[in-house]
Amino acid sequence: MPKIKIPRKSTNVDMTAMCDVAFLLLTFFILATKQKPPEVLAVSPPSSVSSKAAPDKSILVTMTSDGKVFLTLGDDTKKAAIIDDLNATKQLQLSPAELAKLKKSEFIGLPLNQIKSAMASNTVISPDKMAGIPTDSTNNELADWIRSVTNAYKGGNQRDLEKMLLVKGDNNTLYPVFKQIKQAFKKNQIYKFRIVTNSEDVPKDSELAKSAGKAAEEK
Amino acid sequence: MAEMDTSSGGGHKKGPGVKKSKKLSTRVDLTPMVDLGFLLITFFVFTTTMSQATAMNMNEPKEDDVENQKKVKESGAMTILLGKKNQVYYYFGELHPDKISEEFKSTNFKDIRKLISDKKNGTPINDLMYIIKSDSSSTFKNSIDILDEMTISEVPPGHYAEVDITATDRMLIQKTEEANGIK
């Protein structure tokens, strides 16, 4: 009987295909992840069990740890409308060039009476030097801003606006700042808004975890 | 006579004086590159899911809405006060001036969960009401955490409310802080 020859196969596998796949996936993930907008304001938000993702184009009120309030307007077209509206209602008397500059700025963190001089000068004020939007109970300028926001969204669905209103605060922000922001919303008949948080796991043995487990079982 | 060596490598014509030109393989070992690729993928996958910001819904009561204002039953009410240094104070129902030291208790965020759910399970749902009062020295994190505790303990919306702190409450917090040595 002739011997069956078992051909000796090389253990080397062609890695080219695998390499292709790996880098394809890598490219996909890099491109698919949303680029975080540059965060000029260093804020570490508290965590919550909420799992809803924060909307993209939003009206964001940021509180820093030292109690300053900043406003970020996400939607560019609405942003222009909001700033124009505020310019008209608060008689800021900004020139077209100053208006354009204000519309270009990423966020607003100046009291109304400082905006004109800041926009007229060429020096850029760094965020930590900005005074923030005043929110005192006697001079709640944030309420004026929010009024312009509601004016810009007038005619649209109130719910859409509520979904877009975000408040983001630092862990160490004191409560009165948050209260003043709520006051500014309330003055404009806004009673619903959202708070940006970091997601957190539901604690085990809590009632929420149990009912979530039950709901999963029934499915 | 001049002769060209046309033999390819791996032949068996090795002999003295015969020059063997080595044919280099164009194949590169791609294993490390694959390793690197997957390492980067893992890195990206992990970092992106971790930093996902979420949004929590907030509902504020309409202040001028008198019709909706319910009278809170004393038996079903639990007042939670937030003080500085992540301290939590609480009392059930109303405080009686002669028994304040027994009724006004201090706790922390770890233990408040059990207190909230105990109260919820021991009270008819219609009477249940949590009143949250934040002192001006408490932080934003505290007020979000306590609202989160309400979600965790599945307190139905409308059964908890944030209320402005009163002077009496503030004074009691101050006294307890002094007694507990919290600065």
Image (tube, rainbow, N blue to C red):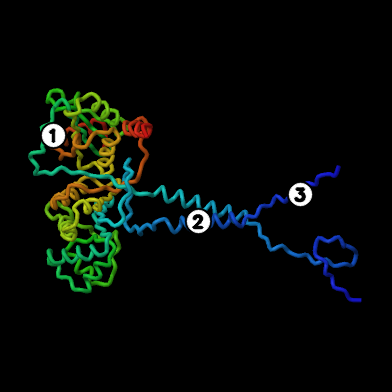
Q: Residue A26 shows which numbered tag?
A: 2
Circles 2 and 3 in contact, beta carbons < 8 Å: no
Q: Amino acid at mark 3?
A: Arg
Of the 4 image quadrants, the one containing the C terminus of chain B is top left
Residue bearing the label numbered 3: A8
Select label 2 or label 1 by which is in front: 2
Viewed as shown, does residue A212 lie left or right of B159?
right
Discs 3/1, front: 3
Q: Out of A166 and B4, give the one closest to the viewer.
A: B4
Q: Of helix, strand and loop, which one carries label 3?
A: loop
Is residue A184 in view from this perspective?
A: yes
Q: Amino acid at mark 1?
A: Thr
Marks 2 and 1, how far apart at CA: 60 Å
Q: CA distance from mark 3 to mark 1?
A: 89 Å
- The residue mark sitting in front, 2 or 3, is 3
Q: Quadrant of residue B178?
A: top left
Query: Where is A217 relative to A21, above or below?
Result: above
Label 1 chain ID: B
Residue pictured at 16% horizontal, 27% vertical: B93
